[in-house]
Image (tube, rainbow, N blue to C red):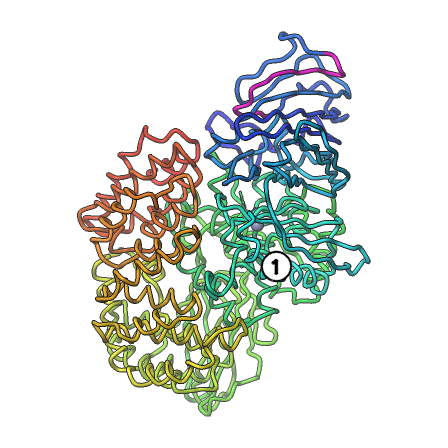
């Protein structure tokens, strides 16, 4: 790791190992929201290979009260601190550095370092927040063992938590007490955490596969603890699953999780002390939707699974971020797929990839899964690092198969345990275990942009020879004009006239086995000899390769394949393709609409298909996904075409929609079993279509009034609000009043308000900001109102007069002074601005340009510059 070069970027190529190591760190906190004092005792030892390097530590906004070397107070000429780095002069050998600093949690609105959330005191250190707590080599390849002593007022802070195992508590007199924690595993500072306050817990205990007794606790503010039970179960399931599927056990005596209302991201995997955004912990059926429950389970798993992929094996530097994030998303996705429906999980992931990661990869902020330079690392917690990173791991899994993948993971964990690893370490473990050369595969990490596959067919009527020609290409991205061919696993199937799969393998100029071709060059050919008739091909089953695939099906072919295909993901995807054809105004739009209507009618009346799958088929591609497929986006035209199609299909499908809505009523009534959740998913999908046909929205009103679960109530409220039903204001009022004390449910109605598809919604958003509901220091509230407006309200954000862009830009400037990471995420809504058709492109550019000179944070400035460059 290193400091920025003259160009303002940190470069991967400049990495140097730490000149000083810190084998152990002892911290003592005198906790107080206004002014906390932190005593740090660091054991320092120079790298013997590089003696004589200066001793420099990171430190930000720290008030230095005392400093001593080997027990001797340091005179001022022996050190200097410029607000960023502390330099200690004239030290060359092993030594002990003591510092005492003062920090101010109550005014820390950035929520990095030590801060207050409600009455809790907590920390967030990834990526570079630890330097806001005390002086340290704040880089992931410096990994001490830690001892942490917390002292605080007992009444205000009865519970004192830190990383590792608890080793003792004592009373300090005068109402103060102390707790000591030890983390025996070498751990980088970004995984440091403490949490203090009047928390209550739900708890359980289990024995790991290795025979270790572990106490599991979820902590929350007292009123919330009743809603932690589901998350506790999710921790247990995650722990057991990692034992079963990856042979990985938990490695401390206690696993603590804390829920906080103020948290910038989703959650954080600190060693032995995960800290969560409360929205990913708190749930019961009256306040959380089925989607919330599933998200909670998967985020709990994600953080738990980091204990091996991230913590035991950590990162050498921040360029390797996807080494823990992509890998852990892959692992949590497998967890959810093993526990629930694999096909539905795949659909969920691919929807996210297409609507958010593809636009990122095609826009101004595109970057490789392993970037080679950054100005501000907090801007790299992206869809590409997480979601594409996970897809790339899935590509590897597909190429080598489950057994070799598991062997490669075992080897990676064994070889790198307790170390700070790189992508090369990961690849060499997998290369050794699978016996494969992974050098071409590694290009997935260095090349940005979504690869495209174009497949064409030829059939010779006389010989019966059938040929598929596959060409790959990755478009240019910022800084990467030329791309090399990738190693792409292409799954395929051929169906004969009777709808039977043809099992004869093709001849090919590349490796083909079991319906999988390994594409390595720009062009490959697959050839079958002597087929009786032209077959119907299908590709990319399970979406094994994260590519855009083009094959010129006729409408009847797509429709036929949507029934024939063995692979459930592809059946869903073929309907998405029909909808896209219908929506993007191709010459076949009419035929595609008709075929889609027929297919949906059949699905709706087929009681043997999982209702949740039918619901996914009813959900057409969203605005962002469609926009991404267009060279230039005419917002009004696209939204209007989508609405027209939905209206038309709703009329055509009214009978089966009503029938299914009624038939599923009893099963949907309550409970978190799969059947009930599936039934609610399909009923709510039907409800949204049916409400299009009824200006009074009677069905939605009835569902709202009778709902026994938040899933049903919120879906009905969305219909009432978004279709501006007569009952909408009263329903909103009732909902608001019923949940006024609950910030997470309040976020839900605020997000509904912000996403009403209408240019006039901007006024509603602005009006809300004049009420006490507006809490700009709370990231969830900002996301619910402004994030939803900028990311999920095309008609509002993209108003023709540019007022949506100006408004969001203005809010970015205001929030930059409060929480720069939250502000920077909002700016991401502009990533595709160059493809917006006139007059919007120019209006967006003006809104962005107006921000120049107005953003103080490195986060905001970096993003703005990349957007405008
Ligand atoms: N590392 C966290 C996760 O994905 C995300 C995170 C990043 C949280 C930065 C806070 C700050 O699990
Ligand atoms: Zn993560």
Report the magenta stretch's main SS.
Answer: strand
Is 656 or 535 nearer to us in this picture?
Answer: 656
Q: Residue furthest right?
A: 211
Magenta run includes residue 513: no
Q: Which residue is under mark 1?
A: 331
**Relative height, residue 102 to residue 118 (above, below):** above
Is 279 or 112 nearer to us in this picture?
Answer: 279
Is 591 or 684 nearer to us in this picture?
Answer: 684
**Relative height, residue 692 to residue 441 (above, below):** below
Q: Residue furthest front?
A: 174
The magenta segment: 58-72
* Quadrant assignment for the C terminus: top left
Residue 434 seen from this side:
no
Residue 794: image location, x then y, percent: 28, 55
**Relative height, residue 295 to residue 818 (above, below):** below
Q: Is residue 94 left or right of residue 116?
A: right
Residue sitting at x 75%, y 25%: 45
Q: Is residue 645 left or right of residue 550?
A: left
Magenta run includes residue 71: yes
* Quadrant assignment for the N terminus: top right
**Relative height, residue 455 to residue 365 (above, below):** below
Residue 813: image location, x then y, percent: 33, 35
Q: Is residue 471 left or right of residue 11?
A: left
The total of numbered circles placed on residues is: 1
Residue 647: image location, x then y, percent: 24, 73
């Amino acid at each position: 790791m290193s400091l920025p070069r003259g160009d303002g970027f940190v470069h991967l190529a400049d990495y140097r190992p730490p000149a000083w190591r810190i084998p152990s760190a002892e911290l003592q906190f005198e906790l107080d929201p206004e002014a906390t004092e932190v005593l740090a005792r660091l054991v320092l030892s120079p790298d013997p290979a590089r003696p004589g390097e200066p001793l420099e530590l990171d430190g930000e906004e720290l008030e230095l009260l005392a400093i001593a070397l080997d027990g001797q107070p340091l005179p001022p000429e022996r050190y200097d601190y410029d607000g960023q780095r502390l330099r200690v002069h004239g030290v060359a050998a092993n030594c002990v550095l003591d510092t005492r600093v003062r920090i101010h949690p109550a005014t820390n609105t950035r929520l990095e370092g030590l801060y207050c959330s409600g009455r809790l005191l907590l920390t967030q250190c990834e990526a570079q927040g630890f330097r806001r707590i005390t002086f340290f080599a704040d880089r992931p390849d410096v990994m001490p063992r830690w001892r942490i002593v917390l002292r605080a007022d007992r009444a205000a802070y009865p519970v004192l938590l830190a990383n590792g195992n608890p080793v003792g508590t004592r009373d300090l007199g005068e109402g103060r007490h102390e707790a000591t924690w030890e983390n025996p595993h070498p751990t980088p500072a970004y995984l440091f955490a403490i949490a203090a306050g009047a928390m209550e817990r739900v708890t359980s205990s289990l024995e790991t596969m290795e025979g270790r007794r572990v106490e599991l606790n979820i902590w929350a503010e007292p009123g919330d603890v009743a809603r932690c039970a589901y998350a506790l179960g999710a921790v247990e399931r995650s722990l057991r699953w990692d034992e079963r599927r990856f042979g990985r056990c938990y490695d401390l005596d206690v696993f603590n999780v804390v829920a906080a209302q103020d948290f910038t991201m989703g959650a954080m995997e600190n060693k032995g002390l995960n800290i969560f955004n409360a929205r990913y912990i708190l749930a019961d059926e009256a306040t959380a939707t089925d989607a919330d429950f599933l998200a909670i389970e998967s985020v709990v798993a994600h953080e738990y699974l980091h204990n091996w992929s991230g913590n035991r094996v950590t990162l050498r530097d921040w360029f390797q971020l996807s080494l823990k994030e992509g890998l852990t998303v892959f692992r949590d996705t497998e967890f959810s797929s093993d526990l629930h429906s694999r096909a539905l999980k795949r659909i969920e992931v691919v929807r996210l990839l297409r609507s958010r990661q593809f636009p990122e990869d095609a826009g101004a902020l595109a970057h490789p899964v392993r970037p080679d330079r950054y100005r501000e690392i907090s801007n790299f917690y992206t869809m590409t690092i997480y979601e594409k990173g996970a897809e790339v791991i899935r590509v590897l899994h597909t190429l080598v198969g489950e057994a070799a993948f598991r062997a490669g993971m075992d080897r990676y964990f064994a070889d790198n345990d307790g170390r700070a690893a790189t992508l090369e370490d990961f690849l060499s473990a997998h290369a050794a275990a699978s016996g494969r050369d992974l050098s071409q595969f590694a290009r997935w990490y260095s090349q940005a942009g979504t690869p495209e596959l174009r497949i064409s067919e030829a059939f010779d009527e006389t010989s019966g020879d059938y040929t598929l020609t596959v060409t790959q290409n990755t478009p240019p991205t910022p800084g990467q004009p030329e791309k090399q061919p990738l190693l792409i696993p292409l799954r395929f199937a051929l169906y004969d006239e009777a709808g039977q799969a043809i099992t004869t393998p093709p001849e090919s100029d590349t490796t083909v086995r079991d319906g999988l071709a390994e594409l390595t060059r720009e062009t490959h050919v697959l050839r079958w000899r002597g087929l009786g008739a032209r077959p119907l091909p299908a590709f990319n089953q399970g979406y094994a390769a994260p590519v855009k695939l083009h094959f010129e099906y006729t409408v009847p072919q797509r429709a036929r394949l949507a029934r024939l295909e063995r692979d459930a993901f592809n059946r869903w995807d073929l309907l998405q393709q029909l909808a896209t054809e219908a929506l993007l105004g191709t010459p076949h739009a009419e035929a595609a609409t008709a075929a889609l209507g027929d297919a949906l009618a059949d699905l709706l009346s087929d009681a043997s298909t999982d209702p949740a799958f039918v619901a996914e088929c009813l959900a057409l591609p969203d605005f962002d996904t469609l926009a991404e497929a267009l060279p230039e986006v005419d917002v009004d035209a696209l939204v209007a075409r989508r609405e027209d199609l939905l209206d038309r299909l709703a009329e055509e499908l009214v009978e089966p929609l009503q029938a299914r809505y009624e038939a599923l009523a009893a099963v949907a009534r309550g409970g978190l079993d799969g059947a009930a959740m599936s039934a609610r998913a399909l009923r709510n999908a039907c409800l949204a279509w049916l409400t299009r046909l009824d200006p009074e929205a009677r069905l939605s009103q009835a569902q709202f009034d009778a709902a026994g679960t938040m899933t049903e109530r919120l879906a009905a409220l969305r219909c009432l609000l978004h279709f501006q039903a007569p009952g909408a204001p009263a329903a909103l009022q009732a909902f608001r009043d019923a949940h006024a004390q609950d910030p997470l449910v309040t976020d839900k109605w605020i997000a509904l308000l912000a996403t009403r598809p209408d240019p006039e919604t901007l006024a509603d958003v602005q009006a809300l900001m004049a009420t006490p509901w507006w809490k700009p220091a709370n990231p969830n509230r900002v996301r619910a109102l402004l994030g939803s407006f900028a990311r999920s309200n095309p008609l509002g954000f993209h108003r023709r007069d540019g007022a949506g862009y100006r408004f969001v830009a203005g809010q970015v400037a205001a929030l930059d002074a409060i929480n720069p990471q939250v502000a920077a995420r909002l700016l991401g809504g502009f990533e595709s601005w160059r493809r917006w058709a006139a007059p919007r492109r120019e209006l967006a550019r003006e809104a962005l340009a107006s921000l120049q000179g107005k953003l103080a944070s490195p986060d905001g400035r970096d993003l703005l510059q990349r957007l405008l460059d």
